[in-house]
């Protein structure tokens, strides 16, 4: 087990979607179940949180600093947490469907991708989810395209350095998939297994570093795996928590690994054994990351 170089006790139930914003030099993330948006300056140890009117599964940066595109309970919204602004732009999910949005990320061409999933109860979870691509549209009206239907828990969205390979996962299947991707047309190829199937845990959130390696948080197994572009293991971090949810690389030199974690579903005994569950973990590995993509802008 490798202890983090630093951690922040923020008591997250389901911390997710860490993003490093190089403009503000802050780490951003959400707690899905607490309906909170978080912001942290690692140099001052001053985490800030903002209440959201809906649970948010993921979000992406926009050109206007402090304003974000988000995947929320009923679809997509633009929000500015410091001003309390929250503007739904594509409410597409209905309450009676028992669905919510989950993992998401902006691709290299500026489209925002996110996946939907069925809530439980009811049990058992059904494959009613899918991945969606939100594009600004030529006339400013958002355009939504659907992908990979019959998904239970969408996760692990990220793209290769050249933007031509799309990675994703249905966590219940235990594999990270990859497929060819043409951002200009939205066309995807036939998905193939990139990593897995996992024998323990399930693939959660991922990111790509400057060497085109994929980092994946393995929910339930307490580890982070770094994969080479050919899908072989390059590095494994064994964590002091069982439920890492997602990763990003940030810091002033873009070489620190940040990990969001969760306490969701852990009983009293597990919580006592994992005092860092629900925290933000930082590992100073010296491996360079990539700048986060911005919605509506080609990188």
Image (cartoon, grey):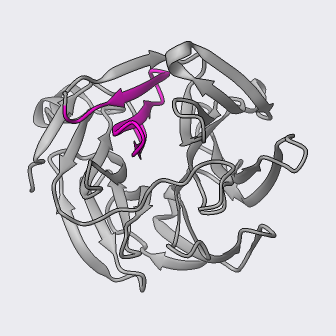
- Residue at the spot x=49%, y=17% of the render? 82
- Residue at the spot x=52%, y=63% of the render? 173
Picture coordinates of residue 103, whole percent (x, y): 54, 47
- Looking at this view, is 213 or 67 the one in front? 67
The quadrant of the rendering that contains the C terminus is: bottom right
Picture coordinates of residue 237, whole percent (x, y): 19, 62
Q: Which residues are magenta?
A: 15-43
Residue 124 seen anywhere in this rendered image of the structure:
no
Classify 235 as above or below 88: below
Residue 280, picture quadrant: top left
The quadrant of the rendering that contains the N terminus is: bottom left
Classify 31 as above or below 148: above
Looking at the image, residue 160 sits to the left or right of residue 271; the answer is: right
Looking at the image, residue 197 sits to the left or right of residue 199; the answer is: right
Residue 233, picture quadrant: bottom left
Residue 44, picture quadrant: top left
Picture coordinates of residue 171, whole percent (x, y): 49, 57
Picture coordinates of residue 95, whole percent (x, y): 74, 25
Residue 80 painted magenta: no
Residue 25 painted magenta: yes
- Residue at the spot x=77%, y=67% of the render? 186
- Residue at the spot x=48%, y=78% of the render? 194
- Looking at this view, is 118 or 49 the one in front? 49
- Looking at this view, is 17 or 264 the one in front? 17
The rendered magenta stretch, by its main secondary structure, is classed as strand
Looking at the image, residue 162 sits to the left or right of residue 135; the answer is: left
């Amino acid at each position: 087990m490798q202890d983090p170089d630093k951690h922040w006790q923020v008591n997250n139930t389901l911390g997710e979607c860490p993003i490093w914003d190089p403009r503000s030099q802050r780490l951003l993330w959400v707690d899905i179940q607490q309906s909170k948006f978080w912001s942290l300056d690692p140099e001052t140890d001053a985490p800030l949180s903002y209440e959201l009117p809906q649970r948010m599964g993921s979000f992406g940066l926009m050109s206007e600093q402090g304003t974000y595109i988000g995947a929320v309970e009923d679809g997509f919204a633009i929000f500015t947490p410091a001003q309390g602004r929250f503007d739904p732009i594509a409410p597409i999910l209905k309450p009676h469907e028992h669905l919510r949005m989950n993992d998401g990320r902006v691709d290299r061409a500026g489209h925002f991708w996110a996946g939907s999933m069925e809530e439980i109860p009811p049990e058992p979870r059904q494959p009613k989810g899918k991945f969606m691509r939100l594009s600004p549209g030529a006339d400013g009206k958002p355009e939504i395209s659907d992908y990979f239907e019959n998904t239970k828990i969408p996760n692990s969205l990220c793209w290769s350095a050249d933007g031509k390979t799309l990675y994703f996962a249905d966590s219940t299947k235990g594999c990270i998939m990859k497929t060819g991707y043409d951002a200009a047309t939205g066309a995807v190829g036939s998905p193939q297994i990139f990593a897995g199937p996992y024998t323990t845990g399930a693939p959660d959130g991922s990111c790509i570093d400057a060497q085109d390696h994929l980092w994946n948080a393995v929910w339930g197994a307490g580890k982070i795996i770094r994969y080479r572009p050919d899908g072989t293991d390059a590095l494994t971090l064994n964590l002091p928590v069982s439920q890492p949810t997602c990763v990003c690389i940030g810091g002033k030199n873009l070489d620190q690994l940040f990990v969001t974690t969760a306490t969701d579903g852990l009983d009293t005994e597990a919580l006592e054994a994992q005092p860092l569950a629900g925290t933000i973990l930082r590992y100073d590995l010296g491996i360079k990351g990539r700048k986060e993509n911005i919605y509506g802008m080609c990188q």
